[in-house]
Image (cartoon, helix red, strand yellow):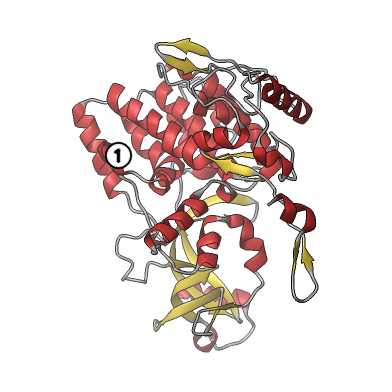
């Protein structure tokens, strides 16, 4: 691999492709082996900073620190070589990583935290199980499990949410849907206000880290403020679970700036690819589609490309389909008069049930075969208001342009109003209402 990294890969056409190895990701045990570092249960185990940790109740705990002493690339290389020569543990370094000679970005900047393992399979699962076992009564546990089980999602989510009692079989995608969408609206009904508001700090921070710059250039800064507050007060609500994976969330702001949002990272694609080779089956046999489904970072390369199925039948990436023969109501007639100068609305306007946008199919309320799917409820923007929610009544074309008729969901109050009496209310106002409505 080192030879390929230096010389590149020649082709018959004469083009020489240079390989740039950007970084390294994986779960904590895998990274520990790859970079020759102490494991996640030892002292000085953080790859990014000098936090020692304390040993309490037979566990290594990493409590909140406002100021972190970060490891520089020069220090990382120095201590790694020193540990290699002396065969000792120096601030967590056990030797020189064999990958250091081929990675083009120096350690530790090249390390990418895998939020699938760190945030979803570890911290989120641990917190939910702690709440389930320590805050809820048996009757409430049954009610919460039913809410999780019966919660509807758009059909393209593929997986819903499992009851907490079935977490032994829960997959990362199910935990992702729970954390980002279903957890806070459903579980807040069973928790004290202060505990629910504290959990809202984590959910909101993860929503910000997971997506684009939703609130502008301050997105990662606000997310880090929320996460820092959550981490700082974690011991007020949870005992003995201030472990290494919680500490790693302190470095998500730097990762967001260096590598992008969490939706473009993680090991979902690698895990699916391993499963494909192991079982020779997956949701798709097209490995290119498998990568695209798991990494939004490649979206920009396919937006303007012509897509083909294996049968070479072209598929439009943005079009209305499933036409509906219905009379044009007064609202559509008025809309036509505003959009078009012709005098034949019945010929100009065409009504449709469904809309395909970048391989995602959205339903309308006149599409009656949607089952329990909620693919008709959307978040949209109008004028300067980007946080509107509503149900799509129908799609239509007018003057050769596509439109959706949306019945606006009028919010009775802000979601943050549930936490008016909480000390976290003011900081939650910065972002929570962007994602959730009532």
111 and 415: which is toward the camera: 111
Q: Which residue is mark 1?
A: 168
Q: Residue at x 34, y 47 (%)?
A: 161
Q: Which quarter of the rendering shows the C terminus?
A: top left
Q: Residue at x 66, y 62 (%)?
A: 300
Do we see residue 75 in this rendering? Answer: yes
Q: Is residue 329 above or below residue 86?
A: below
Outermost residue toward the left in this view: 139
Count of marks overlaid on the render: 1
267 and 94: which is toward the camera: 94
| Image-quadrant location for residue 130 | top left
| Direction from residue 375 to residue 93 in the image, left or right | right
Q: Residue at x 41, y 27 (%)?
A: 196
SS at badge 1: helix
On the image, the x and y values in percent for residue 250 come to 60, 27
| Direction from residue 358 to residue 341 in the image, left or right | right
On the image, the x and y values in percent for residue 20 come to 73, 53
Q: Residue at x 56, y 78 (%)?
A: 316
Q: Is residue 266 above or below residue 376?
A: above
Do we see residue 408 in this rendering? Answer: no
| Direction from residue 290 to residue 111 in the image, left or right | right
| Image-quadrant location for residue 327 | bottom left
On the image, the x and y values in percent for residue 369 come to 31, 71
150 and 385: which is toward the camera: 150
């Amino acid at each position: 691999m080192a030879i390929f990294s230096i010389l590149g890969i020649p082709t018959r056409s004469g083009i020489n492709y240079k390989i740039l190895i950007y970084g390294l990701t994986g779960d904590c045990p895998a990274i520990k082996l790859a970079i020759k570092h102490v494991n996640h249960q030892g002292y000085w185990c953080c790859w990014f900073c000098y936090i020692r940790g304390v040993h309490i109740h037979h566990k290594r705990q990493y409590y909140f620190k406002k100021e972190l002493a970060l490891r520089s690339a020069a220090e990382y290389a120095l201590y790694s070589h020193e540990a290699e020569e002396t065969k000792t543990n120096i601030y967590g370094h056990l030797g020189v990583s064999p990958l250091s000679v081929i990675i083009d970005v120096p350690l530790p900047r090249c390390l990418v935290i895998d939020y699938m393992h760190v945030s979803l399979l570890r911290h989120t699962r641990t917190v939910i199980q702690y709440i389930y076992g320590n805050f809820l009564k048996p009757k409430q546990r049954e009610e919460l499990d039913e809410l999780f089980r019966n919660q509807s999602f758009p059909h393209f989510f593929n997986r819903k949410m499992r009851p907490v009692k079935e977490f032994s079989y829960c997959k990362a995608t199910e935990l992702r849907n729970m954390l980002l969408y279903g957890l806070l609206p459903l579980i807040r009904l069973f928790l004290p206000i202060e505990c629910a508001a504290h959990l809202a700090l984590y959910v909101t921070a993860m929503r910000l880290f997971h997506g684009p710059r939703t609130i502008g250039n301050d997105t990662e800064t606000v997310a880090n403020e929320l996460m820092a507050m959550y981490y700082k007060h974690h011991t007020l609500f949870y005992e003995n679970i201030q472990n290494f994976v919680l500490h790693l969330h302190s470095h998500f702001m730097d990762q967001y700036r260096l590598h992008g949002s969490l939706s473009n990272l993680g090991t979902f694609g690698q895990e699916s690819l391993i499963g494909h080779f192991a079982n020779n089956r997956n949701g798709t046999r097209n490995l290119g589609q498998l990568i695209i489904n798991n990494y939004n970072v490649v979206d920009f390369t396919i937006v303007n490309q012509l897509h083909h199925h294996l049968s070479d039948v072209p598929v439009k990436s943005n079009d209305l389909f499933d036409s509906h023969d219905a009379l044009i109501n007064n609202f559509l007639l008025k809309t036509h008069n505003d959009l078009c100068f012709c005098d034949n609305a019945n010929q100009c306007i065409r009504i449709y049930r469904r809309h395909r946008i970048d391989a995602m199919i959205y339903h309308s309320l006149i599409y009656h075969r949607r089952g329990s799917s909620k693919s008709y409820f959307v978040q949209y923007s109008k004028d300067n208001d980007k946080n509107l929610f509503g149900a799509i009544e129908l799609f239509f074309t007018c003057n050769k342009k596509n439109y959706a008729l949306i019945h606006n969901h009028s919010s009775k109050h802000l979601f943050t109003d549930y936490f008016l009496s909480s000390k976290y209310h003011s900081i939650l106002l910065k972002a929570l209402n962007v994602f959730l409505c009532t």
